[in-house]
């Protein structure tokens, strides 16, 4: 049986792959070439919608359990909830910049590239903290049965199981493309 740490880790692998693809497209744009704006938009849209609805509920449940059973150890992870909010705000700015570009509203290329690169770096750092601090802490401090039970208890919206809109994106994030 897959536990909640396994599920969170699998999501993180997808996010990392998508961030790498986004970074590649931003590098193309930074060189003055034309990136795949559809791909950029799809990745940004996915990262704005899916984590909040389908990933963060799992992390939130795990954080609550860790707070109850190992609160002192969580200090090392920092304020992950607040970082989720900061990243969402930063990604909204990237999305606004992208919308301006797509509508051919003047925005300096360097400004957009810097916003996007800053978001990507910060998101990668955030994932690294979760992968190197929070998830190992959960494995060390919580019984496997608790992690399995938590995975079964977290009820995600129905849309999380049917992501037709993002199917192409996720297939390639899983190594299929």
Image (tube, rainbow, N blue to C red):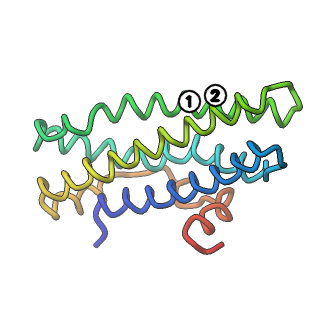
The residues bearing labels 2 and 1 have C-alpha atoms spaced at a distance of 5 Å
Q: Secondary structure at mark 2?
A: helix
Identify the residue shown where x is 77% and y is 33%.
Answer: 109
Identify the residue shown where x is 83% and y is 48%.
Answer: 33
| Residue at far right of view | 104
Q: In which quadrant of the rendered image does the N terminus lie?
A: bottom left
**Nearer the observer, 35 or 176:** 35
- Residue 123's tag is none
- Residue 90's tag is 1
Against 140, is 107 above or below?
A: above
Q: Quadrant of residue 145?
A: bottom left
* In this rendering, position of residue 134 left or right of residue 67: right
List x then y, in percent, for residue 42: 70, 50
List x then y, in percent, for residue 54: 47, 49
Identify the residue shown where x is 68% and y is 65%.
Answer: 168
List x then y, in percent, for residue 155: 38, 52
Q: In which quadrant of the rendered image does the C terminus lie?
A: bottom right
**Nearer the observer, 62 or 96:** 96
Q: Label 2 belongs to which residue?
A: 93
- Residues at badges 2 and 1 in contact (C-beta under 8 Å)? yes
């Amino acid at each position: 049986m897959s536990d909640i740490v396994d599920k969170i880790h699998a999501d993180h692998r997808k996010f990392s792959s998508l961030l790498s693809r986004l970074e590649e497209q931003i590098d193309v744009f930074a060189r003055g070439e034309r990136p795949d704006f559809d791909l950029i938009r799809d990745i940004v849209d996915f990262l704005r919608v899916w984590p909040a609805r389908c990933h963060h509920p799992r992390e939130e449940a795990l954080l609550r359990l860790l707070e109850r059973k190992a609160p002192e150890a969580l200090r090392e992870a920092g304020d992950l909830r607040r970082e989720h909010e900061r990243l969402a705000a930063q990604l909204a700015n990237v999305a606004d910049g992208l919308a301006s570009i797509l509508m051919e509203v003047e925005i300096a290329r360097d400004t957009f590239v810097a916003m996007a690169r800053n978001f990507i770096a910060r998101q990668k750092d955030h994932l690294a903290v979760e992968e190197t601090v929070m998830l190992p802490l959960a494995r060390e401090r919580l019984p496997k049965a608790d992690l399995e039970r938590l995975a079964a208890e977290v009820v995600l919206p129905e849309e999380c199981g049917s992501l037709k809109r993002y199917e192409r994106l996720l297939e390639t994030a899983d190594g299929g493309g």
